[in-house]
Image (tube, grey):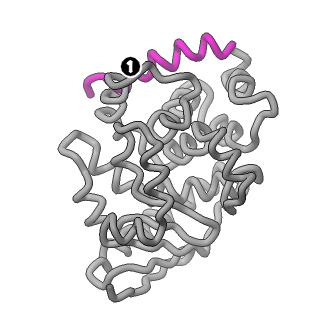
Amino acid sequence: MAWVESVSPSFHARHDDVDGDDAARVLDQLERDRERLAGLFAHAPGELTVVLHDGPTALALAQPYLLVTRSLTAPAGRRYQTGCFGTSEIHVLAPRALEERASGAEGSREALLLTPSVLYAAVVVGANNPDLPPPFTPSSFARLARWAWLAQGAAQFFGRQVPHLRPAIARRLREGPAPTFPPSARDAALLGGTVFDLLAREEGEAACARLVGRLHPEGGGAWLERAFGGRAAKHTDGTWRAHLARLAGPA
């Protein structure tokens, strides 16, 4: 593979020479994401390199632990595990490979093409919460695993992916036991964003940014009670399940 570099004011991209036009679109997408998230967060990092891989094998060779995280994700969400992030780099499938990965379900292509935005949002989350990666350390990784619904859910929500995941959410609700609230680590990559979607509808996007800004020492339930205006977590649980049903229903 012959690597070529493209640049924008805040990002660099490394990619195959056939992906030049797509790389330009990805960089433009990320510049708009950075501008939008800078209005919600104190820090919206730039100077990141986006590495666009031409297929799943190349991505797995560059970031082998992605295979592990995908295997730990509920089957309905695995299709959307197509990249990873660090302090200075984002690794993701090139847009043409993302499109090849899409199912025939409504929204699948759109959700996958937003993967760079989701990964950049994850970087922003880590930049504004010192307890979460990046950087990845044993302690920050342990916290990420414990608070996966918050970290992955915020990335999914701020990456604007949630509205496109209706068929995947519907599949998850049909498969396996009922999800927990907040979602388990296995469900975090697919359902975590729905918690933020509900919060945004009730309290606004600024409340979502505040929620992800720190980790509550008493755990997710206590933090969610505060985020939802003091409403008991068991009541928000019911509201969230009704919200899931709406998201999974016909468009």
Q: Is residue 158 above or below residue 42?
A: above
In the picture, measured across the screen, residue 192 lies left or right of residue 176, that is right
Depth check, front residue: 101 or 21: 101
Q: Is residue 101 above or below residue 59?
A: above
Counting from the top left corner in percent of width and height, residue 132 is at 70, 51
Residue at far right of view:
217
> Which span of residues is magenta-colored?
232-251
Disc 1 packing (10 Å; few <14; some 14–19; many ≥20) = some
Counting from the top left corner in percent of width and height, residue 234 is at 62, 12
Q: Quadrant of the C terminus?
A: top left
In the picture, measured across the screen, residue 106 lies left or right of residue 8, that is left
Q: Which amino acid, mark 1? A: Ala
- In terms of secondary structure, where does tag 1 sit? helix
> In this figure, which residue is indicated by the disc labeled 1?
245
Counting from the top left corner in percent of width and height, residue 96 is at 26, 66
- The chief SS type of the magenta part is helix
In the picture, measured across the screen, residue 3 lies left or right of residue 221, that is left
Q: Quadrant of the N terminus?
A: bottom left
Quarter of the image for residue 145 reads: top right
The residue under the point 52% across, 15% down is 239
The residue under the point 22% across, 46% down is 103
Depth check, front residue: 76 or 235: 76
The residue under the point 42% across, 64% down is 92
The residue under the point 54% across, 59% down is 120
